[in-house]
Amino acid sequence: MSVIEHFNFFNVLFVNGVIRLGTLFRSFMINILLDMWGAIPAVILLVLHFFLGVPLWFFVMALAGWLVIVGTMTVLMHLITSQPDTPHKQKKNMNPYSKKGYETPDIQR
């Protein structure tokens, strides 16, 4: 790994596959696009702000709440998928020819 890759904060946040910031950000953006319906209450509050004078912080809180929920779900999914599969149990060696390991044949003539 080169020095530039090692210190590039936007590509790697934690090393060895714990969380890669680039993939996390891309997944967050895709989740925002897929869950656009969650922003409807914030948009309604923004429209109400301009027409009825509802305080703007209602809009900000609704938008921030939606982004926190989407971000939490994205991080949880990344943490779940980054876990290794269940370890395989060691199988008992049933082959009678390899129980003792490999032995070199005696080739003396």
Image (cartoon, rainbow, N blue to C red):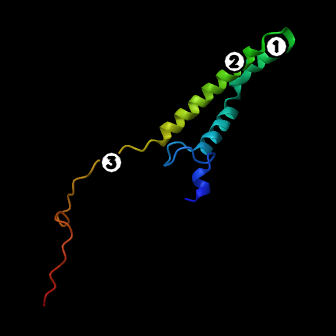
Quarter of the picture holding the C terminus: bottom left
For badge 1, the amino acid type reads His
Q: Where is residue 104 drawn, in percent x and y? A: 19, 77
Rendered residue at 71%/28% (across/down)? 36
Quarter of the picture holding the N terminus: bottom right
For badge 2, the amino acid type reads Met
Q: Residues within 10 Å of mark 1 (few under 14, many from 20)?
A: some
| Residue that label 2 marks | 61
* Sequence-earlier tag: 1 or 3: 1
Say if 28 sits above or below 17 in the image: above
Say if 34 sits above or below 40 in the image: below
* Sequence-earlier tag: 2 or 1: 1
| Residue that label 3 marks | 88
> What is the CA distance from the residue labelled 2 to the residue labelled 3?
47 Å
Say if 105 sits above or below 71 in the image: below
Residue nearer the viewer, 99 or 28: 28
Residue nearer the viewer, 3 or 45: 3
Tag 1 secondary structure: helix
For badge 3, the amino acid type reads His
| Residues under numbered marks 2 and 1 in contact, where contact means CB atoms less than 8 Å apart | no
Tag 3 secondary structure: loop
**In the displayed structure image, the side of residue 2 where residue 89 appears, left or right:** left
Q: Residue furthest bottom?
A: 109
Q: Where is residue 35 drawn, in percent x and y? A: 67, 29
Instruction: Using the rendered view, name the quadrant where residue 75 is placed.
Output: top right
| Residue that label 1 marks | 49
